[in-house]
Amino acid sequence: MRTFLTASLLAAAFAAPLAFAQESPAGLWKSIDDASGKPSALIRITENGGVLQGKIEKLFRTPDQDQNPTCGLCTDARKDQPIVGMTILEGLKKDGDEYNGGQILDPKNGKVYKSKLTVRDGGKKLEVRGYIGMPMLGRSQMWLRQE
């Protein structure tokens, strides 16, 4: 019985950091286009000093589409830069159960929106909201964890 209790405590001690890590938005995510319901990109979110950043690693494109498009509609330093490798999410910090205070770029239209993230479903999903002014004036996408 004592061995079982010790083994259980050790297992819980090793599992706790893993469970916590899954609650963080850091990792690889598949974005789903809210209009078509199809995967649109893989985005890698990293955390540095408590601040999140997200870069596009891969685009899901049909064979007839440009496989390495640029952001022709961007108006900042990202104008005409390749979308793959581009930072689209930046400046988000943990605030209770959410990450906010940052911004997200929509490479389809070149616009930058305020953003907030909420980890859902035990770390398997990420609700990504882009908005102008207030969070209720925007739209959300659900991203799926890939690793």
Image (cartoon, rainbow, N blue to C red):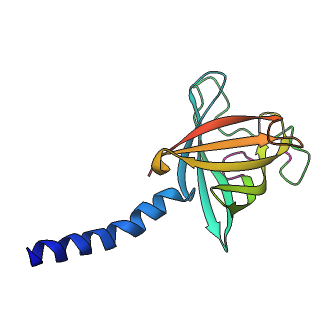
Left or right: 134 in relation to 9: right
| Residue range highlighted in magenta | 79-87
Residue at (65, 36) in percent of width and height: 141
Left or right: 73 in relation to 22: right
The quarter in which the N terminus is drawn is bottom left
Q: Nearer the viewer, residue 55 or 15?
A: 15
Residue 13, image x and y in percent? Answer: 32, 73
Q: Nearer the viewer, residue 33 or 86?
A: 33
Residue at (63, 29) in percent of width and height: 33
Residue 79, image x and y in percent? Answer: 86, 47
Residue 25, image x and y in percent? Answer: 57, 56
Q: Nearer the viewer, residue 39 or 20?
A: 20
Callout count: 0
Magenta span: predominant SS is loop
Q: Nearer the viewer, residue 15 or 111?
A: 15
Residue 43, image x and y in percent? Answer: 60, 48
Examine the rendered structure and indicate whether residue 50 appears above or below residue 129.
Answer: below
Left or right: 132 in relation to 43: right
Please check the rendered image and state whether residue 101 is part of the magenta-colored stretch, yes or no. no
